[in-house]
Amino acid sequence: MSSFPQSKAGEDRLEGLLDRINRIASGDASEDEPLEATASHDDPSDDADALGTPSVGAEGHTSSGEFVPPEPKSYREAGLSDTQVEELMLKYLLARGDAQGRQIADQLRLPFSLIDKTLRQLKFEQLVVYRDAAEVNDYQYQLTENGRERARRYSNDCSYYGSAPITLKDYIKSVKAQSIQGKHPTLADLKVAFSDLLINPKMLTRLGPAINSGRGMFLFGYPGNGKTSIAERVTKCFGDNIWIPRALGIEGEIVRVFDPNHHTEVPFGESNGLLADVKYDRRWAYIRRPTIIVGGELTMEQLELRLNTSTNVNEAPVQMKSNCGTLVIDDFGRQRISTDELLNRWIVPLEKRFDYLNLSSGKKTQVPFDQLVIFSTNLQPKDLVDDAFLRRIPYKIEVENPSEAAFRKLFEIMCPRSGLPYKPDVIDYLINTHYKPTGRPFRNCHPRDLLLQVRNYCLYHDEPLDLCNDYVDFACENYFSIM
């Protein structure tokens, strides 16, 4: 155990000094306030400008108009109660054993200035004790026997002790502020988004109005022509990054929204120093605008809240995780559920732009349905759905086979990427020997796949990477053996 100052005056002065440093670090005080100040204030002013950091308005927008969730200065501002925070703290300490105050603040992703006050209250109630002192006015905390008993009761109801939840009201505001409905990509935006693909200008002309509608589309055509690749790049037209909550609190239930399998987190205003460059609510994750692709594995359960009965934590459905982005239903028509079931589930959301989800309590809750839904299929849309649903998806875009000129251009692009020399005479041989005599259609995926076979052949035989007629014959014999 560490020893503490014995002088009451000295202890008060040290505590005041450390509290002042702590409030500067959390943004609750101005750097110009004298260090002799010992009393904390309950209504801290926004000192972002005084600290020389970009400010975030109360409505969550920077001066440039970008939505940024502001750092809460109280639990009420964060939409939390003291009891909610207490539950998360005690469950975390129960799982970890002991932790510093700042570690608890990082776990709950709340300002340390708020967490510190609650920890002091829990100590007063004899639910936690100081195990040891820590740096910068912090301590190592540990549960008492009463604290462990209360934490176990909380854990029996719900074992979640991650980021403090965001309210549904704040989530709805964030979706509205970052909605794709307010985005109107131009031809220039599409060219940037599709810059790494060889795409027909006529295709961009078809895609542009469909993307601007934000209502969804069918992409259909033969397999291997890049429907999925096109769908993946559509999201880039709406902008790069958005904010999503790590978890939502809805009617007393926890719903996980941030999913590392589908969301890519990117840094925002991070600083290695004591002060953050931008004061934002760390309960939100700054991610690349999502593109979520589901294929034949899609089930009806994935379209509803899924409750983990062992933890009592809900997992958000895929359409909710794709809000403000793109949801791609790949291989539409080959899901484990019928197309009628899937489409009937989404008739209202596609029209009204909101969805209803069932909570485990039996209540229904309304959530935003704000994404571009792309149905990608190798089949004709009219063979999959009836006219009523086709009317609700007004854009049906066929991804056609490439022309011979485009096919040759793909080889020119893909050869350097595969580490192989581009030889026009070998491509002539390939087309005249393996395509034209058999009437084999060109596909956008063929250049990549055939060159990969040639590369692997050279590596296996320890030969220099090269492109020649014999290697092309070998690749075609393997690739088209049953096609």
Image (tube, grey):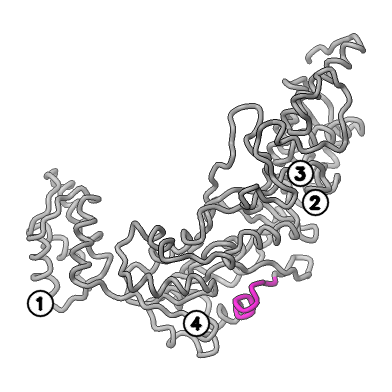
Query: Judging from the image, what secondary structure is the residue with disc 4 in?
Result: loop
Query: Judging from the image, what secondary structure is the residue with disc 3 in?
Result: loop
On residue 79, which mark appears? 2
On residue 72, which mark appears? 3
State the quadrant of the C terminus: bottom left
Residue 189 at x, y = what percent? 43, 61
Is residue 173 toward the left or the right of residue 434 in the image? right
Residue assigned mark 1: 437
- In this view, the mark in front (3 or 1): 3
Magenta segment boundaries in residue numbering: 346-356
Query: Judging from the image, what secondary structure is the residue with disc 2 in?
Result: loop
| C-beta proximity under 8 Å, tags 3 and 1 | no
Q: Main secondary structure of the magenta part?
A: helix
For marks 2 and 3, the one nearer the N-term is 3
Residue assigned mark 4: 394
- In this view, the mark in front (2 or 1): 2
80 is higher (above) or lower (below) than 278: below
| C-beta proximity under 8 Å, tags 4 and 2 | no
| C-beta proximity under 8 Å, tags 2 and 1 | no
- Mark 1 is surrounded, within 10 Å at the Cα level, by few (under 14), some (14 to 19) or many (20 or more) other residues, namely few
Q: Amino acid at mark 4?
A: Pro
Query: Judging from the image, what secondary structure is the residue with disc 1 in?
Result: loop
The quarter holding residue 95 reads: top right
